[in-house]
Image (spheres, coloured by chain):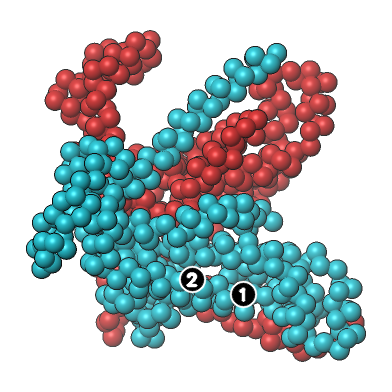
Chain colours: A cyan, B red
Amino acid sequence: MLARHYIGESWKHGLLIIGALIVLIPFYMMVSMSLKSQQEIQSISGGLVGAQEIQTFPVCTKHGYTEEVCTMRPYKYNFWFAFKKAPIPRYLMNGLIVTVSIFLIQVLIALPCSYALAKLRFKGREFVFSMVLFCLLIPVHAIALPLYVMLAKAGLVDTYAALIIPWTISVFGIFLMRQFFMTVPDELIDAARMDGMGEYSIVWKVMLPVAIPALLAFAIFSVVAHWNDYFWPRIVITGNRDLFTPPLGIREFRGGIDSDEFGPMMASIVTVTIPLIVAFIVAQKRFVEGITMTGMK
Amino acid sequence: MHHSKAHIWFVWPAIILMIVILILPIFLAGGISFTNYNLGNSSFEWVGTENYEKMFSRKTYIKMIISTATYVLIVVPVSVVLGLVAAIMLNSLRFGADIYKTIFFLPVMATLLAMAIAWEFTLHPTLGIINSFLANGCGGIREFILGFHWLPWVSSEDSWYSVACANNMDFPYWLKDKKTAIWTICFIGVWQAFGFNMVLYLAGLTSIPRELYHAAEMDGAQSTWEQFKLVTWPMLGPTTLFVVTITTIRSFQVFDTIEILTKGGPAKTTYVMMYAIFEKAIQQNITSIGAAITVVFIIFIILLTFFQRYVIEKRVHY
């Protein structure tokens, strides 16, 4: 009986390991290329990390650095040169500014609205809620073109505002919070009113703390979506490098298969991709919850 | 009952933003699609349905519909089934499930654009490890695979693998060949999406009460397959509906991999709708055609969600 169990189990592990290896191939490629020298990449040799021989990098000397500066191990060179070639910290900063602003504005708009929809009685409440349900059907990416035309007419292309405005309203956030607030007992709110709290303080001092778990899930969902979003920034940021978000930065590093050196290029891509992946691995449970819960309810 | 005007200040900002950001653009796209308006031009004329006629008669746009449909029809079922299979397997494991879960979820989290570039190198004909792996396998692995000659696609010496080995390692160019490009893009789409579906199915599986399986066993459903048919699959109905809906909507919006890897080519075989909107309206500044594609696109998505929400929903409840 037990033996049969183990055979069944190892058969599954075999399949899952093959699946896991296939899933990991591009990650392996990415990390490996960011560590190895150009020759090793081109000859597909050196395994994951390469030989790491100290050498002088010709592209580096061509950029006007002394031979002494340009002599080091490949992994060090790739990351060092990546930061020399592009303002990576700036891109990461932009990513942070945009994702955090989007999230804060979304909460500022959605939280009071969902509280009103769940707990206040007023004329037209049902209508507003059905509007929310209808808007849930519209993916913002699908209406990107008319939005772009509107922003262009307003002279907002190539600004932070263009990156943020279309995402300020999250009907999804409203829906999620509303469902969450429905489960909060009315007594809590009544007690707050007895204590003489106004509706505004109820939203921010009573409902907000109660909603933290849902907000956290929504935060993860929102930040992941906008940190990784490429389509929208690609449309509204046309040339100003100072406004590049991480994915736009990645695109710029790429320069194509024919770009002179792959190592530093992959090093920049790894640098930009790593913050989110590390955050995910550290707080895995929360991430999975956040991203799934946001859909299931 | 409580009386306050607070709700006005609570609800109106959201209403205004919904109207301006989500609803108005749909009408704007509808309006522009009946004109010859280009961004930057001061004047325009009404042209009736000309843009739509172009869209449904020109080869480019027919190809656009075909490649979008191919992508959606491959990625949705494959990633849903893979997600379900992975979830069921992980659910039955006694150890190690968490590690697989993390790995399978990694592509969902990672910046897709970065991963597209990583795939570009992985699949590259001379730099990539896929083709070098295949080339290394031409000796040993090929013999090993030919051992399975009873399988139809390795039946003989003229299987594509043997031919490629014999012709000086002539392996597919994956993203550059019009025969393989769309399938490769689909593969990357599945790679990216199935972990998300798996996690949703895992959540769905934990909510199935154990007693149902005991009851099914009592009723004579002994094999795993029978229990799956009788309990698991019907109980996962709502999850499946949700998973299918969200994967479909996401697949319709595929863009990142296309822009980085194929730019709609070769021969427009990967010319999906989002890329078409981007290329026509943003790069070539033909706003009116872009608007017409946008309208068709939105109609597709809304019809689909309505269909899934209201028609199928009636059937998934057991």
Residue A107 got which mark? 1
- In this view, the residue in front, A174 or B54, is A174
Q: Would you say residue B222 is visible in this rendering?
A: yes
Q: Chain of mark 1?
A: A
Asked if marks 2 and 1 touch (Cβ < 8 Å), the reply is no
Residue in the picture at 58% in, 70% down: A170
Task: Tell me the SS state at disc 2.
Answer: helix
Residue B211: quadrant of the picture:
top right
Residue B9: quadrant of the picture:
bottom right
Question: Where is mark 2, residue-wise?
Answer: A99
Q: Earlier in the sequence, mark 2 or mark 1?
A: 2
- In this view, the residue in front, B237 or A16, is A16
Image spot of residue A70 (x, y percent): 16, 60
Question: Same chain for the residues at labels 2 and 1, yes or no?
Answer: yes
For mark 1, does the 10 Å Cα neighbourhood hold few (<14), some (14 to 19), or many (20 or more) residues? Answer: many
Image spot of residue B24 (x, y percent): 50, 76
Residue in the picture at 31% in, 77% down: A242
Residue in the picture at 25% in, 38% down: A46
Q: Chain of mark 2?
A: A
Amino acid tagged 2: Thr
Image side of residue A128 versus residue A63, left or right: right
Locate the N terminus of chain B and report the quarter of the image it occupies: bottom right
